[in-house]
Image: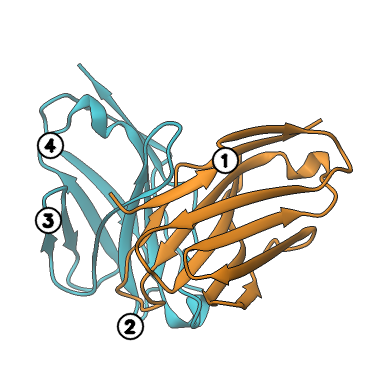
Amino acid sequence: DAKTTQPNSMESNEEEPVHLPCNHSTISGTDYIHWYRQLPSQGPEYVIHGLTSNVNNRMASLAIAEDRKSSTLILHRATLRDAAVYYCILRDAARSGNTGKLIFGQGTTLQVKP
Amino acid sequence: DAGITQSPRHKVTETGTPVTLRCHQTENHRYMYWYRQDPGHGLRLIHYSYGVKDTDKGEVSDGYSVSRSKTEDFLLTLESATSSQTSVYFCAISESPGLNTEAFFGQGTRLTVV
C-alpha cells in the first residue's frame, strides 16, 4: 500500500511561508497526491492535488519531487486562520478502487504564532 | 463552499436507542460518504453511496446502515447505539470516484452515546 509520512506537528510565524513535507516513498506511477486540511471543529477541506508537476492555486502550492517520493505543501504567507491539521493523502486505484474514498493518516498539526 | 448540510450537529443519545444522521447536498454529486473521526484513528470510512439506492460498506461498517432514496440525501442509521459509536461523523460528497477528483465535507455531527 502506498502510504504517507508526515511530521506530527510544525510551527510557523504569521505572515511567513510554511513548507509542510510529506514522504511517500512507495508511490506508484498513477497515484495522485492530495492535500486536505481540517480547521478546528470543522470538516476536512480540499487544498490541492497533483500527479507529477508542481501545482498552484489560490490556497497553496504543491511541489512534487522529481522522483515523486516526496512532496511539499507550501503556504506562501501563513495566517492565524491556517492553523489546522494538514493531511497528505495518496489517491491510488488499488486502495480507492471505484469508491473514491480517502484514506487519512494522522496529518501534521500546524500552529501559527502571531 | 459546497452545499452540504449535516443534521443534527450535536446529539446525545442513550445506549440501545436508534439514531439517524442526515446528510443533505445541493451539488447533485453522485458519490456520498460517511466517515467517523476518533482520536488516534483519524477519519475512517463507514459507508458510501454511488447513486440512488446504490450503497456499499467501508472499513468500519459494523453497527451502521445507510440509505439513499434521493440524490441529495444520504442517511446513516445506528440501529442500536453503543458507547463505541460515540464519535464525530462527517459526510462527504464527490462528483466522481476519479483519482484526481476532490471531495467536499460537511461540518460534522458530534454524537455522544451515554
- Residue that carries the numbered disc 1 in the rendered image: B109
Residue at x-position 60% and y-position 69%: B68
Q: Chain of mark 1?
A: B
Mark 1 residue type:
Thr
Q: Secondary structure at mark 2?
A: loop
How far separated are the C-alphas under marks 4 and 1? 33 Å
Give the mark nearer the N terminus: 4 vs 2.
4
Q: Chain of mark 2?
A: A
Q: Residues within 10 Å of mark 1 (few under 14, many from 20)?
A: many
Q: Nearer the viewer, residue B3 or A38?
A: B3
Q: Quadrant of the C terminus of chain A?
A: top left
Q: Residue furthest right?
A: B16
Mark 2 residue type:
Thr
Q: Residue furthest top?
A: A114
How far separated are the C-alphas under marks 2 and 3? 22 Å
- Residue that carries the numbered disc 2 in the rendered image: A30
- Residue that carries the numbered disc 4 in the rendered image: A17
- Residue that carries the numbered disc 3 in the rendered image: A57
Q: Residues within 10 Å of mark 4 (few under 14, many from 20)?
A: some
Residue at x-position 74% and y-position 45%: B85
